């Protein structure tokens, strides 16, 4: 019987999977609206930077996805709207405080910073038309 995964590793793999999904959503949005691509690229770049920072905390032998989680899937909608991205950012930011219970102090700081960035993304996306 395999040893249970460390709760922090499970948390990290889940957050990383969600971040990968967010990057994918931004990619879809930039591909579906060339006029918005330049505006959305910095948002996507910040999510990619979050991924780099999160992956630094993963143990080398950690699974690439949390156990029992479905593989990330691209949105079935042909176009990802700014409103959809804003809602996704708002939900991601709201999830961060719930994730702190299984996080080390260092990871807690990172998650709080990521959540603040996501909240700012939601606000900034709300100003786009």
Image (tube, rainbow, N blue to C red):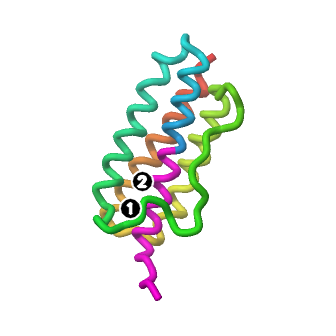
> Helix, strand, or loop for circle 2?
helix
Residue 6 bears which disc, if any? none
Given the current orientation, which residue lies at the most extreme right position?
77
Tell me where the magenta segment starts and ends, as one range.
1-20
Up-down relation of residue 61 to residue 122 (above or below): below
> Helix, strand, or loop for circle 1?
helix
**88 and 1: which one is in front?**
1
- State the residue position of label 1: 108
Q: Quadrant of residue 43?
A: top left
Q: Are marks 2 and 1 in contact (CB under 8 Å)?
A: yes
| Separation (CA) of disc 2 from disc 1 | 6 Å
- State the residue position of label 2: 112
How far across and how far down the image is residue 74, in percent? 61, 40
**24 and 53: which one is in front?**
24
Write the residue at 48% across / 45% down: 20
Determine whether, in the image, residue 100 is placed left or right of residue 59: right
**39 and 6: which one is in front?**
6
């Amino acid at each position: 019987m395999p040893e249970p995964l460390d709760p922090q590793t499970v948390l990290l793999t889940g957050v990383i999977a969600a971040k990968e999904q967010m990057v994918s959503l931004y990619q879809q949005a930039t591909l579906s609206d060339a006029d918005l691509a330049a505006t959305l690229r910095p948002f996507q770049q910040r999510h990619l930077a979050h991924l780099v920072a999160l992956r630094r905390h993963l143990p080398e032998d950690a699974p690439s996805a949390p156990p029992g989680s479905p593989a990330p899937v691209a949105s079935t909608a042909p176009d990802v709207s700014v409103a959809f991205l804003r809602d996704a950012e708002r939900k991601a930011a709201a999830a961060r405080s719930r994730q702190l219970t299984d996080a080390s102090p260092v990871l807690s700081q990172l998650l709080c910073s990521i959540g603040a960035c996501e909240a700012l993304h939601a606000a900034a996306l709300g100003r786009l038309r």
